[in-house]
Image (cartoon, helix red, strand yellow):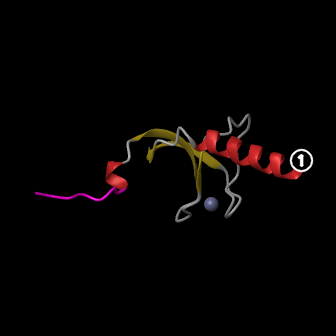
Amino acid sequence: MYFRRQSMEDIPQEQTKIWSCSKDGCKGWMRDNFAFEYTPTCPICHSLMVTRQKLLPILDNSNVNLKLLKKGVQIKSGI
Ligand SMILES: [Zn+2]
């Protein structure tokens, strides 16, 4: 019997659209979360980036968490 820890393997993953650096050997990439209207450049080497699919953990809650964090800051600053 196995007692599996919560690991990366247990997190649901999906093919996610990302931007990947076009330069050989550069590992720069970013999620396509921001609906770019232009081709972004690599934050590391500033080369042009190309769209790709990458298997990533699903982060449905990331935006919600960010909103909650911002709300918290606003409430604090209002006191
Ligand atoms: Zn790069």
Q: Nearer the viewer, residue 52 or 22?
A: 52
Q: Quadrant of ligand 1?
A: bottom right
Name the side, left or right, on which 28 lies relative to 77: left
Residue 5, image x, y percentages: 29, 59
Kindly indicate the quadrant of the structure image that contains residue 26.
bottom right
Q: Over which residues does the magenta segment extend? A: 1-7
Residue 53, image x, y percentages: 47, 41
Magenta span: chief secondary structure: loop
Q: Up-down: is 35 above or below 5?
A: above
Three-letter residue code for mark 1: Gly
Residue 24, image x, y percentages: 54, 62
Q: Residue at x 52, y 65 (%)?
A: 25
Name the side, left or right, on which 79 lies relative to 18: right
Q: Nearer the viewer, residue 66 or 36?
A: 66
Query: Does the segment drawn in magenta span residue 16?
Result: no
Q: Up-down: is 60 above or below 72?
A: above
